[in-house]
Image: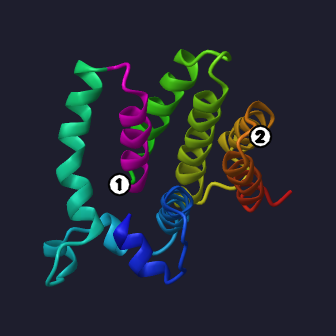
Amino acid sequence: SSAGAASRHVPVGNKELSQRFDELYWDVYAQTTRMDISLGMDIAGLSKPTPADYLYRVIPAMEMLAKVQPGDFENRLRLGIVYRWNNDQLAAIATHEAMVKEVSRERPALRARALLELAWSRIARVSWNRTFDDPDILQAYREAEEAFNTTDRPMDKFVAAYTMGYSLAFTPK
């Protein structure tokens, strides 16, 4: 998160808003140049650790926590995000799909968040592979739309609308 704040140069005063903004920044960044989020310092020839170095270190601990405490949905959401940022596309989608299946409609905030993360995981796969008009991009749009209609939280509504708009970039027709 702090690496995102340092890279984006956009001051955000509210802690929760800043964290969500950083996540969106990395979601979009992970579709583009990706160097410091996907390459470790030794591979990239850099003198200090990159965000990728921290991602590689945290994955085994998060995977173990998901196994021993599957009810820790926040960890599982973040594990899927880390997979996505690490370009482990299928693991990201599978992690978030499992959550969407498990989270009941009686938990609208958590369900909306899981739907949004699943949509971003699908977008990441489609955008990285440059497979325009892939059926997953339409599914991502529908998941973001469901999240928009499910939540009453303004930040999640904004993220859902942004996600729908972003997914349209990969549907040229």
How is the model colour-coded? Answer: rainbow
When the figure is inspected, residue 62 is found, relative to residue 172, above or below; the finding is above
Amino acid type of disc 1?
Asn
* Residue visible at 49% across and 84% down in the picture: 9
Tell me which segment is drawn in magenta: 70-85
* Residue visible at 62% across and 21% down in the picture: 107
Q: Which mark is residue 148?
A: 2
In the rendered structure, the answer to whether residue 11 lies left or right of residue 51 reads right
Evaluate whether residue 34 shows in this view.
no
Q: Main secondary structure of the magenta part?
A: helix
In the rendered structure, the answer to whether residue 92 lies left or right of residue 158 reads left
Residue 159 in the image: x percent, y percent?
68, 52
Of 121 and 54, nearer the camera is 54
* Residue reaching furthest to the right: 173
Q: CA distance from mark 1 to mark 2?
A: 26 Å
Of 44 and 74, nearer the camera is 74
Residue 8 in the image: x percent, y percent?
49, 79
Residue under pointer 1: 86
Query: Can residue 90 be found in the magenta stretch?
Result: no
